[in-house]
Image (cartoon, rainbow, N blue to C red):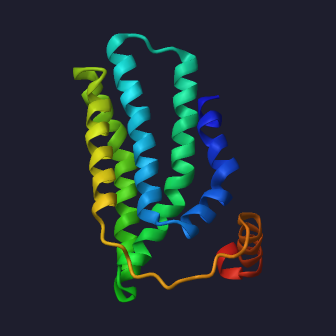
Amino acid sequence: ILGLIAFAPIALLSLYAGSVADRLDRRHVVASSMALYLVCTGTLAWLTGTGAMTLPIIFTVAAMQGVARAFHLPAMNALGPSYVPPAVLPQAIAVSTLAGRFGAVLGPVLGGSLFTLSPTLPYCLALVLTATTLVCALVLDRPVRHAQPYNQRALARIAEGLAYVRNNRLLLG
């Protein structure tokens, strides 16, 4: 159930969040999502430390993290091409993907090890790393971006994006 609660906001908001990432400054979208992650992680740390954790709170935080992830993913994925020169973009994507895989494997091991020392310690480390990401997003220089007209409504842009994906064999596999 927890996985469904965490995934539902992503499923419901992903198309709209992609439109937001295309329309607004992606650095600010990433920073906003990281701020929401900070609130979620801080809440979990505090409630774990005080022993006040309840199942409804866990479900609520999972849903909030799902909202943060729905906006974070498209904005973060689009930041790389804005900053990395096209000649090295494939290598940058490969390194980023590899780092994500290492994090997915090593993160739970590190978190579990820290938990044995103190149940709040993994949350404290997550707070530091999340705050670091938030600061990095805020201090990035504005990327050079070609202006695109956004006189369409969000739903029209989403429909246009879906049509593009449907008609692009490379994207469909």
Residue 76 in picture, x, y percent from top left: 45, 62
Question: Left or right of 132: which side holds 54?
Answer: right
Name of the residue lying farthest toward the bottom: 87
Residue 112 in the image: above or below residue 86: above
Residue 98 in the image: above or below residue 8: below
Q: What residue appears at the point 32 percent right and 16 percent down from the top-left corner?
A: 49
> Which quadrant of the rendered structure holds the C terminus?
bottom right
Name of the residue lying farthest toward the top: 51
Q: What residue appears at the point 66 percent right and 51 percent down from the top-left corner?
A: 13
Residue 160 in picture, x, y percent from top left: 75, 75
Name of the residue lying farthest toward the front: 151
Q: What residue appears at the point 58 percent right and 82 percent down from the top-left corner?
A: 148
Residue 1 in picture, x, y percent from top left: 65, 28
Residue 36 in sight in this render: yes
Residue 173 in sight in this render: no
Q: Closest to the observer: 150 or 129?
A: 150
Question: Left or right of 13: which side holds 60?
Answer: left
Residue 115 in picture, x, y percent from top left: 29, 25
